[in-house]
Image (cartoon, rainbow, N blue to C red):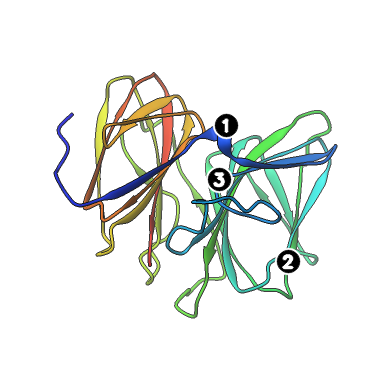
Amino acid sequence: MMITQVDTQAQIYLQNQRGKFQTKEFRSFYTLNFGDYNAENREPFGNILTWNDETLLPQCRHSIIVEEPTRIILLPLVGAIEIDEGKKVKYVDSGESLSLLVTPDNGFEITNPYPDKVINYLQIRVLANDQFAEEKTLIAFDLNRNNQLLPILNDIPDQTKLLIGKYDGREEGVYYSKNPSGNVFVFIIEGAFEVQNRLLERRDGLSLKGAVEVEFEALSNEAILLIMESAG
């Protein structure tokens, strides 16, 4: 794989070095600092505040609260999640992503709707500001469209973008940064990839600063990655 030579700064976040919080009903792994987890070099990346990999047992609930206006992106990986905002309930299934603008006075609950199935989802938090036009966006995508990046977050004025792709072994791809800062965060959901000449495996992350192009190659079949471009 040919890598474009640019002045980039990179940091790998290994899955086995993540923070962890667990109860008898709920478990969350923290790629970035969150709650009581505060480790060196795990600070927010650009406007990405939180990157949590969460598991919820059958028919259990988990409350979401924030201390400042925050864009929360929920991406089910195994099963569906139920969102209870008090007045109405919304279901988000695998193959969908939900983006919510949350303020300190309008938190919500995530519920596992299944009687006998564990669910797994990503919770990503992004610093919100007045430029966000929509309070809630549900986007469906088809991961059977192999070997291409699919947008799963509407374009918004602050240049935050999120894409997902499933790749066959040895298939290559390139993401071209739209943000002058070139702040890009890559997260491996399944399988293994080589990203900018770095090996990343399941649930590893990689932050890149000043990345004009991000080149990657799948090292296993049905490998899935997320690419998020961050402002700031």
| 151 over 14 or under it: above or below | below
Q: Are marks 3 and 2 in contact (CB under 8 Å)?
A: no
Q: CA distance from mark 3 to mark 1?
A: 10 Å
Q: Residue at x 57, y 70 (%)?
A: 135
- Front residue of 111/181: it is 181
User: Sequence-wise, which precedes: disc 3 or disc 2?
Assistant: 3
Pinpoint residue 126: horizontal percent, then vertical percent.
52, 62
Residue type at the position of mark 3: Thr
Q: Which residue is nearer to you in this view: 90 or 205?
A: 205
Left or right, 59 with respect to 221, comes to: right
Q: As shown in the figure, which amino acid type bears the numbered disc 2?
A: Gly
Q: Amino acid at mark 1?
A: Asn
Q: Position of residue 179 (x, y in %)?
A: 28, 62
Q: Quadrant of the C terminus?
A: bottom left
Q: Earlier in the sequence, mark 1 or mark 2?
A: 1
Query: What residue did someone put label 3 on?
Result: 31
Under tag 3, what secondary structure? loop
In depth, the one of 39 and 166 nearer the eye is 39
Q: Nearer the viewer, mark 1 or mark 2?
A: 1
Q: Residue furthest front?
A: 40
| Residue at 34% in and 46% down | 10
Q: Which residue occupies the foreground of this view, 141 or 231?
A: 231
Give coordinates of residue 47: x percent, y percent: 46, 64
Q: CA distance from mark 1 to mark 2?
A: 30 Å
Residue highlighted by disc 2: 107
Q: CA distance from mark 3 to mark 2?
A: 22 Å
